[in-house]
Amino acid sequence: MGLMHELEWWKRAVIYEVYPRSFQDSNGDGVGDLRGILDRLDYLVELGVDAIWIAPIYPSPMADFGYDISDYCGIGPIFGTMADFDTLLEQVHQRGLRLILDFVPNHTSDQHPWFLESRSSRENAKRDWYIWRDEPNNWTSNFGGSAWEFDEGTGQYYYHSFLKEQPDLNWRDPDVARAMFDVLRFWLQKGVDGFRVDVMWMMIKDDQFRDNPPNPGFRPGSPSSQRFLPVYNSDRPEVHAIVAAMRNVIDEFSDRVLIGEIYLPVPQLMTYYGKNLTGANLPFNFHLLQCPWSAAAIAEVIGEYNLALPEGAWPNWVLGNHDQPRIASRIGEHQARVAAMLLFTLPGTLTMYYGDEIGMTNVPIAPEQVQDPAEKNEPGIGQGRDPERTPMCWDQSPLAGFTTGAPWLPLGENRTNVNVAAEQGDSASILQLYCKLNALRKTHSTLISGKLHEIHVEQNVLRFRRSGDEEIEVILNMTHESIAVPISQAIVLAGTHSDREGQTVTGLLTLRAAEGLLVLFA
Ligand code: NOJ
């Protein structure tokens, strides 16, 4: 136990992502808001998470639902006021929770005053704050099509990694860096506990604007953004100086955390911890999200990640976010419990996505209901993120307790069973499993900082041990059949099926389909 309290808070933390438009609406406009989050804080305390990361809540024309920011130091009226934010932050802290904000340094909204100035004339002082060129190159937008947009007024093209309404800032201009670091300080001075940095690996681009090479793996029908390999417009060597400078700003304040959104293979991902760990505290590890759901594949990911982790770097694992299909849809509702047990027994900081704790699934979105620009730009090829962004289901009432108005995205049809109120009253629910796993991490420090070893795979059962003050084994049946496994005598701390808790197991144990166990050796 001793060690646990010496660790920085973010090393012990379970981070809960709130997608603010969909968590809780307090004013009946069908879109979630800050007062809504405030009303649900006690739920998060009961669930047992430690920190909340809220996706962007700033003023935004909402072309990309908040990731197109027109004022970095304000609160979007749809979410509330700065007073609401201050109250939320205070109440979060009063409950012993932490608050992490989203920081979007790569691009602004095209309505941001900086961009309006920049595009006003080639001579404008802020012209160089964005990336302007006479000719486009072959770089593509992540939402499809060219990443270059012609500006009639000034006769040049500007670069946008995402929508044309999201022009990229030019981080080679020191004034941009200064302005953006002041944004960090503004929120840090208010007391926020850290930032999740949007597309950290894209922040700087090749200064020669070399064309990207073709992607030999590209298949017709895939998103057009995959046509070329993003060699020259992402993960450039110069990015690390920016990350380190951001980290310096974070470190002007005590006890804060810098998290990076980075989709890269493990070796490249690790470089974002920075030289001598001067980079991000936690470069998000998304490898569970992309890994096929088999014991062998997961064992390999865990092994590769652990081996590559730099000396002293703190691991982290993510099970869901607002850009990825819901885990319960990807692997099925039964395996979603196994996934929860896996997440909570891996070493390091964990991030979970709102609604996954009740087993929410992707909600089918009819063409006329589509909101996400990623789907609108390239329809029908699975780019849309609306299915995983639908409103949180709190109870069985027709609007699930989310709103009194018309919800901005449809509610899941399974909400009569898949909702907080129903699951709070059911000791066998996935919600109760999440509560249990959160509680166990607080009472068994071995789960947080114990050594991870003896990773074994047999018949699609994944087993591993955690050793610290105690010896714990995790046994996960990733199949839909029962499988008998040998086990040394141990006590069950938790199970995906709640009925084995507290039992002593030994000898040959038959795991039921999609059964996971967390056992403690006496
Ligand atoms: C990553 C965010 O998570 C995603 O939702 C957004 O569309 C892009 N970055 C652009 O900001």
Image (tube, rainbow, N blue to C red):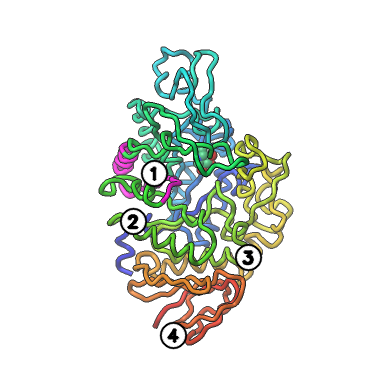
Q: Could you tell me which residue is drawn at 60 percent across and 59 percent down? A: 328
Determine if the magenta segment contains residue 259.
Answer: yes
What span is in magenta? 241-265
Q: Earlier in the sequence, mark 2 or mark 1?
A: 1
Q: Is residue 95 visible to the viewer in this orientation of the structure? A: no
Determine if the magenta segment contains residue 429.
Answer: no
x and y percentages locating residue 485 in the rendered image: 50, 80
Quarter containing the N terminus: bottom left
Compute the Cα span from label 4 to label 3. 32 Å
Compute the Cα span from label 4 to label 1. 48 Å
User: Do residues under tags 4 and 1 come within 8 Å of each other at their CB atoms?
Assistant: no
Q: What number is the disc on residue 489?
A: 4
Front tag of 4 and 3: 4
Q: Amino acid at mark 2?
A: Leu
Q: Earlier in the sequence, mark 1 or mark 3?
A: 1
The furthest residue to the bottom: 507
SS assignment at label 1: loop
SS assignment at label 4: strand
Residue nearest the observer in this picture, 385 or 391: 385
Q: Earlier in the sequence, mark 2 or mark 4?
A: 2
Q: Amino acid at mark 3?
A: Glu
SS assignment at label 3: helix
Quarter holding residue 177: top left
Q: Earlier in the sequence, mark 4 or mark 3?
A: 3
User: Do residues under tags 3 and 2 come within 8 Å of each other at their CB atoms?
Assistant: no
Residue nearest the observer in this picture, 196 or 424: 196
Q: Is residue 478 above or below residue 328?
A: below
Front tag of 1 and 3: 3
Q: What number is the disc on residue 309?
A: 2
Front tag of 2 and 1: 2
x and y percentages locating residue 273 in the rendered image: 33, 48
Residue nearest the observer in this picture, 495 or 7: 495
